[in-house]
Amino acid sequence: MTESTSIPIGGRAAGCPFAPVAELYDAQKDEELHRVTVPSPMLGAFDAVVVTRYEDVKSVLADDQLRMGGSMPYQAGNLLSYDGPEHTRLRRMLTGSFTAKRARELRPQIEGAVASALDALTEAGPGADLVQVFCTPIPTLVICELLGVPYGDREDFQRRTAVALDFNTSREVQMQKAAEMEAYMAGLVARHREDPGENVLGRVVRDFGDQLTDSELAGIGNMLLIAGHETIASTLSASIALLLQHPDQLAVVRDDPSVTEGAVEELLRYCAPAAILPRQASGNICVRDQEIKEGERVMASVLAANRDPGTSDQGLDRLDVRRPAQRHLTFGFGPHQCLGQQLARMELRVALPALFTKFPTLRSAVPDDELDYRTNALVFGVNSLPVTW
Ligand code: HEM
């Protein structure tokens, strides 16, 4: 194992944040695993073993001795706070609401949300900020409908989410925002206990309400609300910014519907919005015969793994929306693999072609090097994306 070097927490290159920092590429080539110091206002600077190869990231995420528990503040009901049988028990209560079939059934609702965002963009006119008018409203509307959260409450929960996911937020403020979110959700849980209705939260209350405390139900609601809008909004903003910088690739997405599914996978691979996934070893383990000791932190770099050429050079540093299906780890791997991935895919598949078809001459209203990327948060994206057409 190498001596510690310092890398930025998201591991993204300055000036070209779709690419990993050089240190991660170096680490990928090295037979020895690298130990890094990660500066984090949330947790204080800490040392961690960083894994960057595709196979190593997969094996780390699948290893039940590498736990979420130690690396995240505990929140009742949030799947990312649990491991082992407790995690399985809770996750099973939710999987039925997030299948590929369920995502297909939601397509008309998603198309409705996309259509109203496109109308809002037409009304706002050239100069509009796509993040405000398009990328954020679509997943927010969809998740509000899925959970039975009033859409009118969005500004409050969006603001709290932004603070909660910012790397620069202190642990104290994190806990305060978590308490505010829990108080907000408590009201919603009480309403669903009385009248569950047909949405996701209602279904959990109806089928498993007697096995869950109010605080666990509030945690489930919060996790889905945060994960359900912020991740997709960020992925949409990053994907659109990237395509606007690659007009040839954008034209393919706009003009050839047969590539949509593959193009979405390629954008997910390339953008890797949740670039780094933290774990903590609950026992001594080995990755490629190198020991990681109990208590050590491990950072799995999805961003680097998604570009790992393995044994053959497949040009994975290049964006190619016609690329044959590629393995990527953007939704994680193993027991914590993203619960909402089918919903996310469906939203991206509907929203991206619809935007470029309705606005075929869409382009960025600011030079590429002035784009305001969000590199300081758990989920990478673009803070604002002014466009013209
Ligand atoms: C493009 C959008 C999305 C991306 C890139 C993404 C990414 C991820 C990743 C990487 C993980 C694994 C975290 C880890 O192992 O440490 C995860 C877990 C999770 N995601 Fe997503 N996600 C997205 C959308 C969604 C949506 C729409 C929902 C819900 C409506 C959702 C709900 C969850 C939940 C509940 C977990 C925790 C699963 C568990 O611990 O068992 N995600 N997501």
Image (tube, grey):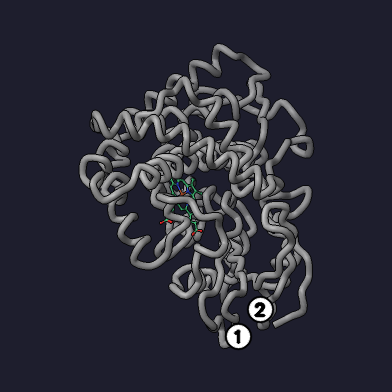
Residue at 65% x, 70% y: name it: 50
In which quadrant of the rendered image does the C terminus lie?
A: top right
**314 w.r.t. 161: above or below:** below
Q: Please tell me how many numbered marks the rendered image carries.
A: 2
Q: Is residue 213 left or right of residue 10?
A: left
Residue type marked 1 = Gln
Residue at 53% x, 31% y: name it: 157
Q: Residues within 10 Å of mark 2 (few under 14, many from 20)?
A: many
The percent position of residue 305, horizontal first and vertical second, equals 58, 65
Q: Secondary structure at mark 2?
A: loop
Q: Is residue 20 visible?
A: yes
In which quadrant of the rendered image does the N terminus lie?
A: bottom right
Label 2 CB less than 8 angstroms from ligand 1: no
| Outermost residue toward the bottom in this view | 289
Residue at 42% x, 64% y: name it: 83
The residue where tag 1 is placed is: 290
Of residues 32 and 179, the one nearer the viewer is: 179
The residue where tag 2 is placed is: 33
Q: Is residue 88 left or right of residue 41?
A: left
Query: Rounded to the nearest whole Å, what is the CA distance between mark 1 and mark 2?
Result: 7 Å
The percent position of residue 87, horizontal first and vertical second, equals 37, 60
**264 w.r.t. 323: above or below:** above
Task: Verify CB contact (< 8 Å) between mark 1 and mark 2.
Answer: yes
Residue at 21% x, 45% y: name it: 207
| Outermost residue toward the top in this view | 123
The percent position of residue 170, horizontal first and vertical second, equals 69, 47
The image quadrant that residue 85 belongs to is bottom left
Of residues 79 and 376, the one nearer the viewer is: 79
| Outermost residue toward the left in this view | 207
